[in-house]
Image (tube, rainbow, N blue to C red):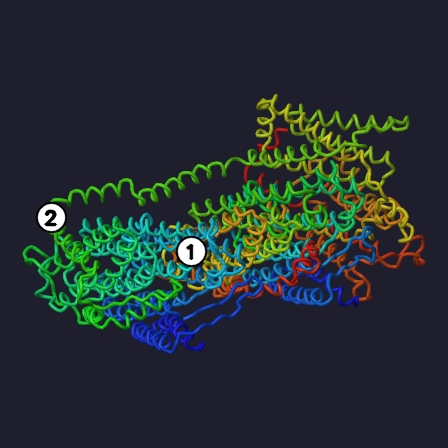
Amino acid sequence: MTLTVLLPLALALLAAPAALLAGTLRTAYAAPVGTVFAALAALATLWGYLSGGGIVDIAWTPTWGLRFAVELDGLATLYALLATGIGFAVLVYSSRYVPLHLDHEARPASDAVRFYFFVLLFMGSMVGLAMAQDLILLFVFWDLTAIASYYLIGYDGHKEGSRASALMALLITGITAVLLLIGALFLYAAHGTFSIPELAGLVEPGPLLTGCGLLIAVAGLAKSAQAPFHFWLPRAMAAPTPVSAYLHSAAMVAAGVLLIGRVYPLLQQSEVLLDILLVFGVASMAVGGVLALTRNVLKQLLAYSTIAQYGFVVAMYGLGGPYGAGGAAFYVITHALAKSALFLTAGAVTEATGEDRLSKLGGLRKPLPLLAVASGAAAATLTSLPLTLGFFADEFFFAAALERGPLFAAFAVAFAATTLAYTWRFWSGVFLGGADGKAEAHSVPALLVAPVAALGGIALLGGIFTGPFESLAEAAGEVSFQAPTPLGASYRLEVLPEYLMALGAYALGVGLILSRPVWSWAALGFSRLGALAGPERLYVLTVHGLNVLSGSLHQLEIRNLRGRVTSVLLPTAVIVGAAVLATPATGAYQVGELRAEEVPLMMVLVGVAAASLATAFTRRHVTLALVFSSAGFALAVAYAFYGAPDVTLVAVLVEVVLALLYFATMKLIPYRTLRRQAAQPLLRPNRKIFVSAVAGIFAFVVVWGALSQPPAGQTVAEEYVRLTPEVHAEDVVTAILADFRGLDTLGEITVVAVVLLGVSTLLGRGITAAKAPSSADSVAGVATRAVARLLYLPTLIVAVAILVKGYTQTGDGFSAGVVAALGLMLRRLALGRGKTGGLPSARGAATIAFAGLLLALSVAAAPLFLGDAVLTHYPSPGSEPIYLGTLELITAVLFDVGIFFLVLGFSIGVVSVFAHTIADEEEYAGPQGYRKR
Amino acid sequence: MGLIGSNWLVVPIVLPLATATLAMLVGRRSAPYLGLLTASGILLSVAAIGLTVLEEGTIRYQLGGWEAPLGINLYADGLAVFMLLMTAIVGAAVSAYAVGYFTSRQDESGRVAGDSGDRSGSFWVLWMFLWASLNGLFLSADAFNLYVTLEIMGLSAAGLVTLERRQSALSSGMRYLFVTLLGSLAYLMGVALLYGALGALDLATLGELMYPGAATWSALALITLGMALKTGLFPLHFWMPAAYSNAISPASALLAGLVGKASFYLLLRLWFDVFDGGLGPGPGQVLGLLGAAAIVWGAVMAVRQRRLKRLLAYSSVSQIGYLFVLFSLATTASWGFDAWSGGVYHAFSHACAKAAMFMSAGAIVRSVGHDDLDRMQGVGQQMPLAVAGFALGGVTLMGLPPTGGFTAKWLLVSASLESGQWWIAVVLLAGGVLAALYVLRFLNPALIQVKVGPVARPATQNLEVTAFVLAFGSFFLALLSAPLLALLRIGTPFASVLLVGTP
């Protein structure tokens, strides 16, 4: 059973890759391979249908109820046969047409492969779409058809119009496809399944069904180019003619009514939805019918005809009942045969004459007699003349309309008459009349006529042997209607109301043809009105409006950094402020008592505040740096008051280095620039003072509120103090840094290494490329040099002392590194670069730094090989330490040595990069800018 | 569990650190080999960690042998392993890409200052540091230690941006540095407030002690803002387009694919493990709204761009919105896990897809010499593999099956429908349509058939292949959703929901 479903599906889906493969081997292979696959798929579908169809239902992602559910039921067979059968005819036609087309466009013959690939992809996804029983699976195939159509419509991509049309088609059908998905999701949320047959049993009339049904129906209507979504279809005529034939008859546009037919079991449960369908259908019949009467270009005329014809189908679904659902399926078959034949005719005519406008064509019955007859049959089918398949299609439509009421019967007759009028206009305009002043025709290849003849022949034969078509349509109608839809397509020798209506339509149609001068101005006026205020105009305006809108938004986007930072800080302030205000303040905002011994501390803090205030009024850069430093030094004193010598040491050293960096940076900027900047008046000082004051008060309140509520329980800090002796340390800070929270330290020294690398890539030409220092003399005096020489070695000794004793006493690897670096820098400043006072090169400094990092890393990772956790230090807590003289031997100290080298290398490296940059700048700009100090 | 088993946990951190240091010391020639070796080592260790976590549950590793509130712990639950895996896969692909990128750059002269060799060396060192910090960030269970990893991450990422020596890259690199420091600073202030109020830094301990109060609210606001800034959540994304589009392409891939995800992960981790779901429903709603706005804004901006890499950068603005939507959906209700895992899954699929797209774009830009979308006509014929990679990644962004993006959107959409916030579902789906539009902005000209000559500089096969392979992986990511979601269930903050939810 499964083979009957899977064989046609597999053949259809494999056709595209097979043709692509064949085409890459040799361009000429693509067409025959594709055609054979299409034929096989059509035969397999027929075989599957005749063997009773089948169903395949595999859980795809079971957790979400997604299923790969395909079934070859009547509806699926109908559309799969159309897709593969018409596809076969179109491919035969294309095998001659596409090379000619490419030749006209001066494009390489190999481009044809792409054409076959996408046509066959289209065919495959249509077959999949026809068989899909699961809304999500359906959506996937739906999107595949959209993609294939995009590339086919835009096949002549070198023409601007072609690409715009392709995009328009994709937008209209793509955006509405999302509506399908949304509708499916809502149904799933309500009923827990995507399976259409299951949903049909579960849904109940109500707002949910109406809403979801409408969403899904709109997706189908847009794809079937129903008004007011119809405007993409005439544009899509930019596609090569075989593509248009296929799109209109069996693929893209047919997919829309296929969807409506597929979900019809859901739709028909809501009267509102049926009425909506009816309105859309009638509107499309009107718009398409009237505009088809005004068009001059062959393919345009046919495109508007398609809109009207699918309007009939949609209206039939809207009318409902057995004649509605079954008749709609029948109508689709008829239309597919006729419309594909007419499009192929248009293509052949244009190929023969090089002309595609009705006004330039005429009298072609003589040079192209076979084509005239074949397309005449197709046109007769479209106009539902007796003895053609189309006759019954209209009969069912009339029957369904009659059931609804006389008004709809009148509509039906009127629009059937317009069909006759424009079809006559097409056929007579091309083939009848005199050939004078019209384009001349040369003969066309047989392969361009044969498919037309075949399709027209089938339509004629169908008018006599209706049985197979009827049973297929009945089977399809049954799937939609969920009940048998007996059609009874046979000629009867009695006067049925449908026959009278048909006669009326013919008469009215002839009247329309004859009275053309009378109404043509009105039809043209309607067409102009549509161009002026129709949906296409709305689409263009919307796209344009969105462009303008996003353009102005983009302006907002690229404002300056200050504005953007404000936009970060301001919301932070608001949110934090709201958070603080919103939370209960019990216990917060308390002022503790002031003890006498804290008065010096208070004075120091006042000093910090004063220094901070002073920064606001200082304009000269050097002073500014000094004031900053003094605030930092004052804070270091505050740490000292709290008995934190380690932190104090680090703070002092950091301040020293920072001040040096400030000055070094300032040396990079020409003195004049600095002075000019310092002399400039402050911009909007009041605003700045206000903002600063508010920010300061605000931060104060937040910190006050947060810190005056100390944690209730025991903090980690107390534990650290208790455990410090256990790890052979007397200095809590060092113990925390090297042992308890060693990973932090490892991370921070990595930061230092990254910064070194960053500074050297940013400022220098990278570490490796930095030049050796050129000789330049020191500016220091004799006394300074002597002092520097004296101090240089002692600083190094101090550094080593801080390092090795750091674990038990004040100090650590970081401080030691900074002290040592300061010593080296002092020497460099005093002795200049020439006389052995040079610092290691940037590369050397980096090597020192990274060697330090490697050492620290090795110490951290070594315990892995001893079976302990990373960053474990030895000797282990509590055990007896080993002494070397007065020196404890602890691996943590080794870790610190790594840090020492890293910091030393970093400091020297940064200074070195700065020094080289300054030297380069001086060489570049000459010294005069700097010496004015 | 044996010590050997849990020791795998330090490998993803220590190994790249050691490689970075060694690569710096032994010189740049060996750096690519060391990098590739490290990438395979990390893949191996992450696989080992993943298998252990799947079999035995979460792993906790005490560094230095110190217990949790006292020392720093590494902690691997499903989420952490998920992110490690994401980073390992994308990282390995970018590493393979970078080998080709830098070797092929050496023949170039003029456009780039004559330091291409050195840039290669700096790239590898910075990238290894970055990788170590990412892995550390995913594994660390300590608030301050997380700050340290953030700093390494931000600084090495800024270094990577400034590897391109054009003026625009330097200025956007400095801007990025500024932003990343501002974000880290906000985070640090938040951590300081937490430590002041609760007296601990270990995440689990913080979570136990958490109470809503002035300090914790302020901490939440500061941390959220810092992380939103670093992730580039609308409207704090202003630094992103410039930084992503001006950096060299391997760096763009890393930044867009991984760095943004790391700060998002950090927020996610703290939000649910420490702040108990945002201390109330309000903050999550705000983030969700901003996420929804980001989806639309970023996508509209992306459609407007005229340059390929800027288009991708704005697409990231949009895709980041999907991540933040989860904050308004992930509650303790029955759909909480769906929303949470959907957001996380999106991070994975977007990381793979966007990195692959930046890699493709890099290969294309390098070959044709510009990234002007209007002049991309016919690129598809010249570089079919790169364009195919771009297209596959693009389909993931659209969220069609069977891509990873589909799983992610699916989970998010179903959560939003179940929670009754259907407007989120609409935004999510609209974002997919807009994604299709901006992907077509490139594919449309690239795939049309025009007569084209050979490109100025033929791409090395390596660049196109690595980009394509990664995109191909992201394309089929939905097929792996069962094991990946099983992984996410381990140690999830939504365990209680899962117990109720499982049939």
Q: Is residue A884 left or right of residue A400?
A: right
- Considering depth in this image, is A716 or A761 the residue closer to the camera? A716
- Considering depth in this image, is A649 or A743 the residue closer to the camera? A743
Rounded to the nearest angstrom, the CA distance separating label 1 from label 2 is 44 Å
Farthest residue, direction front = A494
Mark 1 Cα shell of 10 Å, populated few (<14), some (14-19), many (≥20): some
Q: Is residue A421 left or right of residue B71?
A: left
Secondary element under disc 1, as helix, strand or loop, is loop
Where is A485 relative to A26, above or below? above
Could you say where residue B175 lies in the image, as x and y percent from the top left? 57, 41
Could you say where residue A653 lies in the image, as x and y percent from the top left? 77, 39
Task: Answer yes or no: are tags 1 and 2 on the same subunit.
Answer: yes
Label 1 sits on residue: A269
In this rendering, does residue A772 appear at all? no
Quadrant of res B11: bottom right
In this rendering, does residue A677 appear at all? yes
Mark 2 Cα shell of 10 Å, populated few (<14), some (14-19), many (≥20): few
Amino acid type at image mark 2: Ser
Amino acid type at image mark 1: Gln
Could you say where residue A678 lies in the image, as x and y percent from the top left? 61, 26
Residue at x-position 33% and y-position 42%: A538
Provide the chain ID for the residue under circle 1: A
- Considering depth in this image, is A889 or B354 the residue closer to the camera? B354
Where is A839 relative to B80, above or below? above
Label 2 sits on residue: A515
Quarter in which the N terminus of chain A is drawn: bottom left
